[in-house]
Image (cartoon, rainbow, N blue to C red):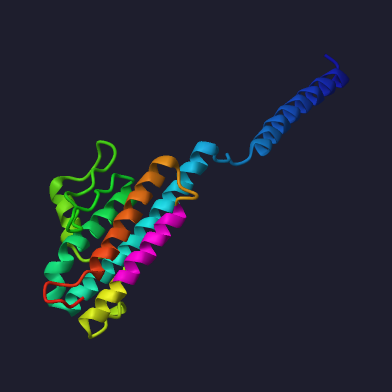
């Protein structure tokens, strides 16, 4: 083979390799990072909504803890409502089922998380008794007057229920039902907090 023939062959091989490499590079650049699909975006939006809704109920739970700490005499009255608020935090965070409040405002049981990976009964019980980790109790102002403390707690219940009601507009159907249930329970709690005690004091 002549020198000219060898040069032509080498040049053709180099050009082919360069073209193949350019094709691979352009394909990779065109693909770029994968964008989340509609299902993934919906899941991310629901997760963010769960976080916000659980945080709202967690702050309410901190209000209960602060009032009980500041006014131990109210502990027996507030205990069932506080337990229900704790159950709502758990249900909203996990997307479970919120228990309806009973006549006294107490939740009949802890919520049943959806799916087989729900916590054990012991873990569920701990949620209803452990202090809320969302806010330091020192950051929650509690009036020295028990009646004023109850009024503040009533306002917090109503505000939290309003927050959950507003979130219905962007919630997926199943989670919207949960939010509606929790909001209704909050409205019931607010009513119960306005009822006078046996001694006639609110």
Count of marks, rendered view: 0
Q: Which residues are magenta?
A: 154-167
User: Image check: 65 left or right of 59?
Assistant: left
Residue extending furthest toward the front: 200
For the C terminus, the quadrant is bottom left
In the rendered image, the vertical position of residue 161 relative to residue 27, given as above or below: below
Question: What's the magenta bit mostly, secondary-structure-wise?
Answer: helix
- As for residue 16 lying within the magenta part, the answer is no
Residue at the image position 25 percent from the left and 59 percent from the top? 85
Residue 133 visible from this viewpoint: no
Q: Position of residue 107 (x, y in %)?
A: 19, 53
Q: Position of residue 133 (x, y in %)?
A: 27, 65
Residue at the image position 29 percent from the left and 71 percent from the top? 153
* Along the line of sight, the residue nearer the viewer: 70 or 42: 70
Q: Position of residue 166 (x, y in %)?
A: 46, 56
Residue at the image position 33 percent from the left and 49 percent from the top? 181
> In the picture, residue 172 is in which quadrant?
top left
Residue extending furthest toward the right: 4
Residue extending furthest toward the bottom: 144
* Along the line of sight, the residue nearer the viewer: 32 or 74: 74
Residue 98 visible from this viewpoint: yes
User: Image check: 124 left or right of 181?
Assistant: left
User: Image check: 77 left or right of 114?
Assistant: left
Q: Position of residue 149 (x, y in %)?
A: 25, 78
Residue at the image position 29 percent from the left and 55 percent from the top? 185
For the N terminus, the quadrant is top right
* Along the line of sight, the residue nearer the viewer: 141 or 7: 141
In the rendered image, the vertical position of residue 201 relative to residue 175, given as above or below: below
- As for residue 158 lying within the magenta part, the answer is yes
């Amino acid at each position: 083979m002549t020198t000219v023939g060898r040069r032509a062959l080498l040049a053709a091989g180099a050009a082919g390799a360069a073209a193949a490499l350019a094709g691979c590079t352009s394909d990779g650049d065109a693909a770029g990072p994968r964008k989340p699909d509609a299902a993934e975006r919906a899941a991310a939006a629901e997760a963010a909504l769960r976080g916000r809704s659980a945080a709202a109920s967690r702050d309410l739970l901190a209000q209960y803890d602060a009032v009980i700490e500041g006014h131990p005499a109210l502990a027996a009255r507030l205990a069932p409502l506080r337990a229900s608020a704790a159950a709502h935090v758990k249900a909203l965070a996990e997307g479970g089922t919120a228990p309806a409040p009973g006549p006294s405002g107490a939740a009949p049981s802890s919520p049943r998380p959806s799916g087989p990976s729900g916590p054990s009964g012991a873990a569920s019980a701990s949620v209803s008794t452990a202090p809320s980790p969302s806010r330091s109790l020192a950051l929650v102002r509690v009036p020295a007057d028990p009646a004023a403390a109850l009024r503040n707690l009533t306002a917090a219940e109503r505000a939290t229920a309003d927050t959950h009601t507003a979130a219905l507009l962007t919630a997926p159907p199943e989670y919207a039902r949960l939010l509606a249930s929790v909001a209704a329970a909050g409205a019931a709690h607010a009513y119960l907090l306005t009822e006078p005690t046996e001694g006639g004091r609110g």
